Image (cartoon, rainbow, N blue to C red):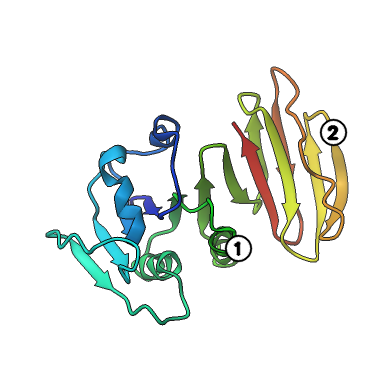
């Protein structure tokens, strides 16, 4: 099945970088204010979801789910749930990290939802690529830095190889986030694995 790309309303300044991640056969879902990115991204929506409190409904000849303004889910969360129900297993989020820190945290939490369902999720912004470590993840030396942040009380059994700061079967507690700003050894590919907990891997461009 195609990968599902969910576009939110957060600012995108580096469209060139973001567009490097997009593929012609992706399934594009624009969430309300995310519609402002449509022309710059160059991809038409396959689905539009929103309560249209931040962007007018464009009334395109495209499937559109109109949501009430008073609801528990954000537009992005609702879009994700719809696409999970439709069988998508691989998700890319863009325009989901930005000025609204509350929406940012809420959107990052969607990566946990996907991990719990054994689905794949990646989130990118102008500066980084983010995912939850669910198996051994690799980081090549094209990234300037990478960081590990636990989104649980504790992430345990963490192993980091081929990096400036290696780790063997370690733990990161929520109150002591010492996994920030690691570096891949030049000419190598670093790997990260985690046995338990929700460990956010942030690869910095």
Nearer to the camera, 165 or 205: 205
Disc 2 crowd, CA 10 A, few/some/many (<14, 14-19, 20+):
few
| Residue under the image location 41 percent in, 32 percent down | 20
**For the view shown, which residue lies furthest in the top direction?**
187
In primary-sequence order, the first of circles 1 and 2 is 1
Does 84 sit above or below residue 33?
A: below
Location of the C terminus (image quadrant): top right
**C-alpha separation, residue under disc 1 versus residue under disc 2:** 25 Å
Q: Give coordinates of residue 9: x percent, y percent.
A: 40, 54
Q: Which mark is residue 28?
A: none
Q: Secondary structure at mark 2?
A: loop
Q: Give coordinates of residue 183: x percent, y percent.
A: 75, 29
Q: Secondary structure at mark 1?
A: helix
Residue 144 lies in what quarter of the image? top right
Q: Which residue is disc 2 drawn over?
A: 165
| Residue under the image location 78 percent in, 30 percent down | 163
Q: Give coordinates of residue 49: x percent, y percent.
A: 31, 66
Q: Give coordinates of residue 58: x percent, y percent.
A: 18, 59
Q: Which residue is disc 1 drawn over?
A: 112
Residue 184 lies in what quarter of the image? top right
Does 65 sit above or below residue 46?
A: below
Does 179 sit above or below residue 47?
A: above
Disc 1 crowd, CA 10 A, few/some/many (<14, 14-19, 20+):
many
């Amino acid at each position: 099945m195609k990968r599902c790309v969910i576009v939110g309303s957060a600012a995108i300044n580096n469209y060139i970088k973001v567009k490097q991640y997009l593929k012609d056969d992706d399934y594009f879902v624009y969430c309300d204010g995310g519609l402002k990115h449509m022309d710059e991204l160059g991809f038409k929506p396959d689905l539009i979801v929103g309560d249209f409190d931040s962007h007018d409904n464009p009334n395109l000849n495209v499937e559109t789910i109109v949501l009430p303004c008073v609801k528990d889910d954000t537009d992005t969360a609702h879009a994700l749930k719809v696409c999970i129900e439709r069988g998508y297993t691989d998700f890319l989020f863009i325009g989901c990290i930005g000025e609204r820190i509350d929406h940012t945290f809420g959107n990052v939490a969607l990566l946990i939802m996907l991990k719990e369902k054994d689905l794949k999720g990646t989130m990118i912004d102008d500066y980084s690529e983010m995912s939850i470590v669910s198996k051994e993840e690799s980081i090549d030396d094209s990234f300037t830095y990478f960081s590990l942040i636990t989104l649980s009380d504790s992430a345990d059994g963490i192993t980091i190889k081929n990096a400036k700061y290696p780790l063997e079967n370690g733990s990161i507690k929520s109150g002591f986030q010492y996994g920030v700003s690691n570096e891949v050894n030049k000419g190598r590919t670093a790997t990260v694995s985690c046995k338990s907990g929700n460990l956010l891997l942030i690869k910095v461009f």
